[in-house]
Amino acid sequence: MRIVYVTTSLKSKDFDIFNSFWSTPLNTSNQTFNNKMIRCLALDQTNEIIVISLRPYTSACSLKKMPYSCASQGNITFHYLKVRKNKILRYFSFRSSAKKYIDEADLIISETINRSCIDLACHLKDVTGLPLVGILTDNPYNISFVNDSYSKKLVELGSKCDAFITLTDKLYELYCPLKDKPSFKLIGLSEDELEKVNGIPEHRKFFYFGGALLKRYGVYELIDAFKQISDQDVRLVISGHHPEKDLEKVVKSDKRIRYVKAIPNKYALNIEALSVANINPRPYQSDLDQYSIPSKIIEYIASGNLTISMKNNELHDLLKDDILWVEDSSASSLKNQMEAALKMTPAQKSKMTSKAKKKIKELTSLSNVSPRIQQFLLSLKK
């Protein structure tokens, strides 16, 4: 099956280089999820994956053009379309450039959280008549730094898809209120194996958090909780994107805290595997909970290490006794679970983490998801 995949995602090594040219690190969650989805589809060797990559571009990026327009990885080919500075010229340039990659395709897949991607995918669907599958990972109205008109347009365009791959039932209902289109639900994706890298410190005990460094996602409560821990040998390592102005000042107030800014995902995965515990401090909100599953929780659990997390209903039902759940969004409750993690014996920790990892791998590993998603996509072929 020849699949055209429209996304902002790049080949992993290319993204790491590309991200280094931004004055403020990019949110890696979209890159990471779509890159894993592309590789998941490619595990079926009968597939050919043609990736049309619309890399992000603003004045914050000092890289004006990619050094090459094409990158191959097995049965995957990434095509990096030229990004024109003028928005109108960029719009028409994307359309004319993408047409040459659509020949003999069987279907189109597109992320729906980026307007350029879903707009281009809808155009390709209209000119070819091919089925379009939308990837639903988050509620557009929950995206940071965009207005409601942008979010509304994303839902309008995404609703034109013929089928959906969705993380939650509510997301599917948002884009398909009548529930009359095919859908495939998964709670996330995880790597089959950890790619070992050098340079990861193993001699210190530390907690780890990686993600959006915005106040509303709980990073300051995490720091407050950590400061209340009396053990002077433990560290807190924080990485991520969108740091607010006050963050570095707060981090410097405790010498045990290390802020390593944005790091490549393969390094993050190795850090997660070595920590005392990995932490998701994002406060529970019912609207967020219904429309998204924090990808970091899936990643943390798949690492085989201990996870401390605020509530998420779907994952709580699945992993009730296999995660250290935080009772509320307060720093004191978070501190209690961090202290509980420090007190656990290796045997206690192993029992909890092995059960959690087994459940998550069965549901999310690329090799386990690949045959199920392949069957779903084959049912959509015209």
Image: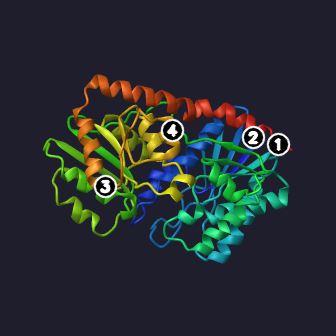
Marked residue nearer the N-terminal end (4 or 3): 4
Q: Give, as a three-letter code, the residue at label 3.
A: Ser
User: Does the image show residue 192?
Assistant: no
Q: CA distance from mark 1 to mark 2?
A: 7 Å
Q: Nearer the viewer, mark 2 or mark 3?
A: 3
Q: CA distance from mark 2 to mark 3?
A: 43 Å
Find disc 3 in the rendering and name its residue: 330
Marked residue nearer the N-terminal end (2 or 3): 3
Find disc 1 in the rendering and name its residue: 381
Find disc 2 in the rendering and name its residue: 377
Q: Residue at x 79, y 47 (%)?
A: 105
Q: Residues within 10 Å of mark 2 (few under 14, many from 20)?
A: many
- What is the x, y in percent for residue 100? 76, 56
Find disc 4 in the rendering and name its residue: 317
Q: How is the image coloured?
A: rainbow
User: Does the image show residue 197?
Assistant: yes
Seen as rendered, the residue at the extreme front is 327
Q: Residues within 10 Å of mark 1 (few under 14, many from 20)?
A: few
Q: Mark number for residue 281?
A: none
Q: Are marks 1 and 2 in contact (CB under 8 Å)?
A: yes
Disc 4, SS: helix
